[in-house]
């Protein structure tokens, strides 16, 4: 059933039980969809996030979607974020991805605040942690600034998904950052870059630190133009930092502060990764609506019946509906595990579920796109139309963050070898064989 025939807003395809407040926030997202949809094909062709998209989202209040109201935001939670990335994904996967990377920065404010409440910092550390956390949240909510979250690097470790080699060196009044970030949207377009680095004078995971780098800072520049298979219009150009100075008031360099904050997450170390998987399910829903609309309105010249009535199309429709439903089911289950209050399962089991859910959602989404391609045939197989973009965008879900095979392997090790989740590591801990 398509959105046109059900009368539901887009977010309700994913979460049919939206609260009144969640629905109000979802309607804000619905209001920007026509403009984002209209720009999607040209944006994909140009390989750049359209100028004005960030202002459009900011004017709708959506840059502060998951920021508490006391920091100028809308007060939404993980359900809101997943519903929003899903909804944006139905019309433009690239915009949805760029938006996710902005919103993921909120965890670098929310998790430290949760850790403060849990008493994880001493009296000397607490004011520094609070100041940084509130700075992040006020920038997103009160100031409506876009923040790109940069953690991933090209070099990988066998015992972790992300290896942090970018260094932070103490200097007068702040820190000098050096390194390259290979993946991270809003490069060249965000107001600030949220950079994960490691102090060069601290060993292990306690070295991990956070910095807010203004876009025009001397010593920072995009790494390379993103010419990827999909999500081409997300400004995913990476980041190069060469003796880039960041003042103390834009730094969270307290040893161990970052890792203590991430311990408060319900799922992955980012705290909201399920919302990125929601994008791929949204792309699948969008392309399925397109394929169904196209084959239901086009008719056979001899019988006048819809093309969708052919036996081949009906087999594809049955398969596509099953794949789409399974993507939604995996997605809803993981959202419930990570957003429920009180928690349904302990964190270890939530992370284990995520290891399966991410791959399952993305593989089902790609299968939906393939079914849509077959339904629409050669005349629908254009590079930049809904079909072409969905095939390429959902293919990125097969490898983004980690493929399904890696997730299954990690899960098996957790169960059989009692290994913890290898989320990220530093050069020091990698060299010592730690995760």
Image: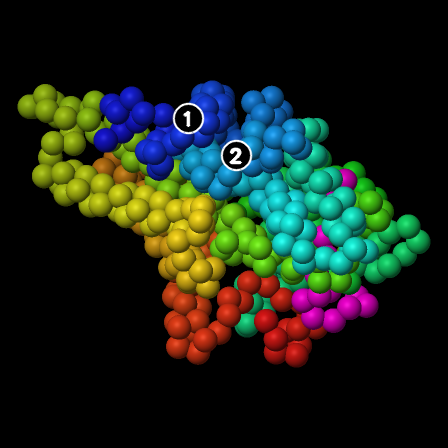
CA separation in Å, label 1 and label 2: 12 Å
Q: Quadrant of the C terminus?
A: bottom right
State which region is magenta. Answer: 200-214
Q: Is residue 98 left or right of residue 29?
A: right
Bin the neighbour count of mark 1 within 10 Å (Cα to Cα): few under 14, some 14-19, many 20 and up: few
Of 142 and 55, the residue lying toward us: 142
Of 156 and 390, the residue lying toward us: 156
Its colouring scheme is: rainbow
Indicate the secondary structure of the residue bearing disc 2.
loop
Q: Which residue is mark 1?
A: 20
Of 28 and 148, the residue lying toward us: 28
The answer to which quarter of the image holds residue 373 is top left
Q: Is residue 416 above or below residue 394?
A: below
Task: Work out whether mark 1 precedes mark 2 in sequence or the reverse, and give the earlier one.
Answer: 1
Point out residue 296 in the picture as x, y percentages from the top left corner: 19, 26
Q: Is residue 124 above or below residue 421?
A: above
Residue 76 is marked as: 2
| Residue at image location 62% in from the left, 49% down from the top | 114
| Residue at image location 16% in from the left, 38% down from the top | 313
Point out residue 258 in the picture as x, y percentages from the top left corner: 68, 57
Please tell me whether residue 139 belongs to the stretch shown in magenta: no
Bin the neighbour count of mark 2 within 10 Å (Cα to Cα): few under 14, some 14-19, many 20 and up: some
Residue 38 in view of the camera: no
Q: Is residue 271 left or right of residue 27?
A: right
Discs 1, 2 touching: Cβ within 8 Å:
no
Point out residue 112 in the picture as x, y percentages from the top left corner: 66, 50
| Residue at image location 72% in from the left, 52% down from the top | 210
Residue 123 in view of the camera: yes
């Amino acid at each position: 059933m398509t959105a046109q025939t059900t009368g539901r807003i887009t977010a309700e395809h994913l979460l049919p039980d939206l609260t009144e407040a969640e629905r109000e926030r979802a309607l804000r997202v619905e209001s920007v969809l026509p403009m984002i949809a209209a720009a999607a094909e040209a944006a994909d062709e140009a390989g750049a996030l359209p100028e004005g998209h960030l202002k459009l989202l900011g004017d709708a209040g959506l840059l502060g979607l998951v920021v508490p109201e006391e920091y100028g935001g809308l007060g939404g939670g993980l359900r809101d974020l997943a519903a929003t990335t899903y909804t944006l994904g139905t019309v433009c996967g690239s915009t949805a991805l760029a938006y996710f990377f902005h919103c993921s920065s909120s965890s670098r404010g929310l998790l430290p605040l949760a850790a403060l409440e849990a008493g994880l910092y001493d009296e000397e550390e607490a004011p520094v942690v609070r100041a940084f956390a509130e700075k992040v949240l006020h920038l997103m909510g009160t100031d409506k600034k876009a923040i790109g979250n940069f953690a991933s690097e090209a070099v990988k470790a066998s015992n972790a998904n992300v290896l942090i080699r970018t260094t932070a060196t103490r200097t007068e009044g702040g820190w000098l950052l050096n390194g390259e970030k290979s993946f991270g949207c809003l490069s060249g377009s965000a107001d600030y870059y949220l950079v994960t680095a490691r102090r060069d004078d601290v060993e292990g995971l306690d070295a991990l630190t956070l910095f807010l780098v203004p876009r025009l800072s001397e010593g920072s520049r995009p790494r390379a133009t993103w010419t990827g298979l999909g999500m081409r219009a997300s400004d995913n150009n990476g980041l190069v930092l060469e003796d880039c100075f960041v003042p103390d008031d834009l730094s969270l360099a307290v040893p161990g502060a970052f890792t203590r904050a991430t311990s408060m997450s319900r799922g992955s170390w980012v705290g909201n990764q399920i919302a990125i998987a929601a994008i791929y399910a949204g792309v699948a829903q969008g392309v399925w609506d397109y394929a169904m609309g196209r084959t239901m309105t086009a008719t056979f010249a001899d019988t006048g019946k819809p093309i969708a009535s052919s036996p081949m199309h009906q087999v594809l429709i049955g398969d596509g509906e099953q794949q789409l439903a399974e993507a939604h089911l995996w997605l809803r289950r993981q959202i419930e595990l990570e957003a429920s209050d009180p928690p349904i399962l302990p964190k270890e089991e939530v992370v284990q579920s995520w290891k399966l859910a991410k791959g399952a959602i993305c593989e089902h989404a790609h299968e939906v796109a393939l079914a849509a391609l077959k339904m629409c045939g050669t005349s629908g197989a254009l590079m930049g139309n809904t079909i072409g973009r969905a095939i390429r965008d959902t293919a990125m879900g097969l490898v983004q963050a980690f493929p399904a095979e890696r997730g299954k392997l990690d899960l098996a090790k957790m169960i059989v070898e009692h290994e913890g989740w290898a989320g990220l590591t530093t050069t020091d801990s990698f060299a010592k064989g730690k995760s």
